[in-house]
Amino acid sequence: MTATIVFDSSTLISFSESCLVGSLPFLKEKTGARFLITPEVRNEIVSRPLHVSQHAFSALRLRKLLDDGVLEVAEPPEGLARELLSIANSLFIIRGGPVEILQAGEAECVALLAAKGAGAIAVDEKTTRLLLEDPNLMLDKIRMEFRSKVEINGERLREWRKTAGAATVLRSSELLAIAAEKGYFKDFGKSEGEVLHAALFSLRSAGCSLTGRELGEYSQVRI
Amino acid sequence: MDEERVLERMAGGLKKANVPQLRALGSELAEESFLTGSPRLVELAAVSYSLGKFLEKHYITGSKRWKAFEKQSGERLAEAAKAVRAGREEDAERAIDSVVEDITEFSESMGRFQVDVVTKARVKIATDAYAHGASLGRACALAGVNKALVLNYIGVTTLSDKYETLSVRERLASARKVFG
């Protein structure tokens, strides 16, 4: 069965800022996977930054992925995106009131993931990832930051889990590692492993939520 | 948050060249803006961070233009505080917007960087919100700043080290399964 992966803008930006955008068409060609983005993600990675000189090149690189069919735009069910946004933004109660933690674009990605029964979501930013993988860890971290009363709304958490469904979360790091396993860096010969590790460091510097410890673990990965 | 008091603290921090005070105030405002979603608190945080940034640079505070800029900013902050006290919201908004415009203009004319100091302050505010729990999208929408700028800033911090869940081995196993 063809893999379908929904991409958040954070992952695409990490790839573009690290000059690793080429790994996506490579991965698509090798695996036949479908890479989906929502209209809002397209706005974030192309439409808006295209008019800002500093970010125009990145926008053009990502636009090429759309033009070449590497990325496909898919509309998430509007009602579902709104519902997920509402649930996420009433999950955490800080100083007596709910706090908005998620934005419409991210909620749309999760909605598309759920609606399409997609294999995974590719997201480099940490909040969407934690909401899908471990909302209680999110709660612990928020409590540490605020050093005041922070609660999680249990009912809303159940609704979130039911509505968002179970999801495999990938980051640009995992996608790049898979591309490397399939030969993306083979032109570097014996240095393939070294190149992968250096590229992962670049992804981290570009904002991929990759820890120092994980970089160490990745250095043990043999291609 | 008592905005009048905030503006007075800011004006005081500027007058006394108290960088830690301005930075701490910027951080408090950033946290509060995340909790409340208040655009005004974001602007005030940006002003506080920016003024602190200027005060760190000797080439700026030693310049011929600094005294005039400092005086004008102080006056505008006092004007904003007075407007808040009198309940004149629009006047307060106008005064704060003027300070932001002045800072941006001053930064562009004096600075040695492509990104002006207000944008840098917004990146800092977004990063603060991100560290406090906001998603990247939420943080950037709140602070009014581009995602790539914030991601690049986060990337050179150890912020991500706090959010580890699965091991790399588990993640790669899942990824291989997805691709079949």
Image (cartoon, coloured by chain):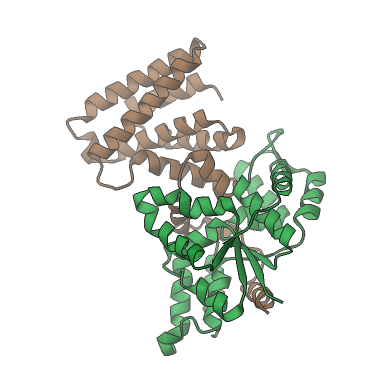
Chain colours: A green, B brown
Q: Nearer the viewer, residue A98 or A105?
A: A105
Hey, which quadrant is residue B74 in on the image? top left
Residue B30: percent from left, percent from top: 51, 37
Quarter that holds the N terminus of chain A: bottom right
> Does any portion of residue B12 appear in the rendered image?
no
Residue B27 to residue A192: above or below: above
State left or right for residue A54 relative to residue B111: right
Hey, which quadrant is residue A64 in on the image? bottom left
State left or right for residue B17 relative to residue B128: left
Residue A26: percent from left, percent from top: 51, 77
Q: Residue furthest bottom?
A: A190
Residue at 60 percent across and 56 percent down: it is A126
Residue B85 to residue B25: above or below: above
> Does any portion of residue B92 appear in the rendered image?
yes
Quarter that holds the C terminus of chain A: bottom right
Residue A108 to residue B26: above or below: below
Q: Residue furthest top?
A: B86
Residue A12: percent from left, percent from top: 51, 61
Residue A69: percent from left, percent from top: 53, 67
State left or right for residue A175 relative to residue A190: right
Hey, which quadrant is residue A71 in on the image? bottom right
Q: Nearer the viewer, residue A159 or B123?
A: A159
Numbered-mark total: 0
Q: Nearer the viewer, residue B164 or B107?
A: B107
Residue at 52 percent across and 35 percent down: it is B28
